[in-house]
Amino acid sequence: MPEGLACLRAAATRYNIDIQLDDKFGDWATCARYAREGAMLPDGWKDVLASYDAIYFGAVGDPSVVPDHTSLWGSLIQFRREFDQYVNLRPCRLMPGIRCPLADKKVGDIDFWVVRENTEGEYSSLGGHMFPGTEREFVIQETVMTRIGVDRILDYAFKLAASRPKKHLTSATKSNGISISMPYWDTRVAEMGKKFPDVEVDKYHIDILTAWFVLRPEIFDVVVGSNLFGDILSDLGPACTGSIGIAPSGNINPEGKWPSLFEPVHGSAPDIAGKGIANPIGMIWAGQMMLEHFGYKEAADGVMRAIEQALEHGGEDVLTPDIGGKGTTKGLGAYVAGLIAK
Amino acid sequence: MPEGLACLRAAATRYNIDIQLDDKFGDWATCARYAREGAMLPDGWKDVLASYDAIYFGAVGDPSVVPDHTSLWGSLIQFRREFDQYVNLRPCRLMPGIRCPLADKKVGDIDFWVVRENTEGEYSSLGGHMFPGTEREFVIQETVMTRIGVDRILDYAFKLAASRPKKHLTSATKSNGISISMPYWDTRVAEMGKKFPDVEVDKYHIDILTAWFVLRPEIFDVVVGSNLFGDILSDLGPACTGSIGIAPSGNINPEGKWPSLFEPVHGSAPDIAGKGIANPIGMIWAGQMMLEHFGYKEAADGVMRAIEQALEHGGEDVLTPDIGGKGTTKGLGAYVAGLIAK
Ligand SMILES: CC(C)[C@H](C(=O)O)[C@@H](O)C(=O)O
Ligand SMILES: CC(C)[C@H](C(=O)O)[C@@H](O)C(=O)O
């Protein structure tokens, strides 16, 4: 987080942007707070945070202190819902200097976005448990898709696709097996497509779509999916580019009625906490996404260039161990901040 | 299919097994029949097929004649349900001579099974559509997991893991996001684990699990998942080994009360139908799985060796175009059958 803030400050100075960074929330949404006060967040958190434009969020979780379920539902997931951050957006991009787990791919080959519905779908709390503890026991969990919920995520995804050179949208479905919700999703995709005649749309069932992520990731431009399918694809995509440890994630309320949230995709990595070797690129890249989201294109491009240059030319002494170097969090962060400032 | 049958016959002769292959059903479950008679199967199909031990099933579908949904639900999916084939079993195995899409993997590195629940879970027909055509429209689709359904697939998966040298079972879950069905699944895994103290169990959330399939497929031995998660993993796994065009799939009723069904994973590939260049290995390997399922271990091993030898040494003239050769379906099939007979 300090490295991410330093890079944001460097970008603000260099590109002359007035960003007010309030870093007094360091203790919020931490497991340490939970251990002390029995809650991840203080009372009244919503009103306080609602007055900001965005939340720049570090990785949460320390399962030795608080179960992940508690820490995540008490912070990240709660923000997504309470602030109606209905878009989860993640880049899948092959970066210079990063080892790609797929054979024979080079920088430029893979460059697409996953757009995930972030508030409804398979993540609902409707359902129940019948005859518990007996042989006839069963559970039901309901997937809920609303016209409003589906249409607004599709609208976002179509607009994003329309803004890109390839203008190509892929919809993740499973209407050949899941017979009510997924055909409905398909119908809304077809309907929305009529409003965006320039966008080429295709759909894949989620099973074969995951296969294509591995076999031909070059073909994707923007991929849109339900909460669960988007969740899967937005881990698989970064995994396929080797960037799961450095990619960012935006949880966006496009209308700006509520704050959006930008975070690294990676978790809190308790195994290396405190060692000073965590890779700060995910956090910095999350800041880059935030700049881009608010329309500071020049600054966002500058930060992106700095990240790419650092990964390509930083060398062993600067890069962190996870990407083959022996550098430190501080060292790599300072290096990127220096490149931004130049 | 003719190549698959020839290989089964060669194995029966060579290993002296009495297999009765009834090939009079060539017209069943075809789109041609649907076009002619309005149904994929004749009346009374269930009684007829129920008297057999197994169904050796070719790829179905010709979307230019019948929508896939109709042809699949009218055949394959119906068999799975009516014959209570509650296990779907698929090998993920790096084969000699097959290009692996993952970097730096060699034969032997990847060799695991995906066990998928095949009758309930996310594929239920429960749910509905409210306020259709209006702004407040929504759909609900219910995932159903029963004690009986979950326990029997776990029992199968644990037994399979226990029978293998590594004795390692991975459970696919999403209990951090899907709050009723998936925690129930986890509870049953923990409960079943007590009966198999020798089996090492771990669980991964489906999002990160798909990432590990790409990043470290070596770590898996047996992976078990719900109907949807198993569906995804059993396409992704073969994709990661480059074998999605040649892998088989078993739809199994373990008690043998009903016939089990063995099929290739690949679809019907209408684009090359009739050209004589489809790769017959998926069909032959499905036969191999069938032999193994019925306990003909020596014969199954023999067919497997023949497949491996053909892939490794068949050469350009024998291998089909999809795997880099310029051979034909007939040629490759005859080559494998010849190796089996030797
Ligand atoms: C065709 C489809 C309904 C089917 C499934 O999802 O079960 C297929 O993907 C499979 O895995 O056999
Ligand atoms: C922690 C978990 C509930 C969360 C999700 O599934 O949404 C995570 O996987 C993510 O993608 O941010």
Image (cartoon, coloured by chain):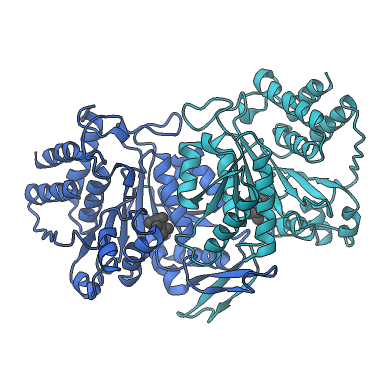
Chain colours: A blue, B cyan
* Image coordinates for residue B126, horizontal then vertical, percent: 64, 72
Q: Position of residue A133 (x, y in %)?
A: 63, 69
Horizontal side, residue B246 vs residue A341: left or right: right
State which quarter of the image contains the C terminus of chain A. top left
Q: Is residue B254 above or below residue B238?
A: below
- Nearer the observer, A334 or A65: A65
Residue at 39% over, 34% down: A100
Q: Nearer the viewer, residue B89 or B333?
A: B89
Q: Where B116 sits versus B237, above or below?
A: below
Give the image location of residue B312, x and y in percent.
65, 20
- Residue A87 shows in this picture: no
Q: Quadrant of residue A156?
A: bottom left
Is B191 situated left or right of B10 in this image? left
Quarter-of-image position of residue A139: bottom right
Q: Specify the quarter for ligand 2.
A: bottom left
Q: Residue at x 24, y 33 (%)?
A: A319
Q: Position of residue A86 (x, y in %)?
A: 36, 66
Side of B321 relative to B206 (left or right): right
- Total numbered badges shown on the rendered structure: 0
Q: Is residue A337 visible?
A: yes
Image: B99 above or below A167? above
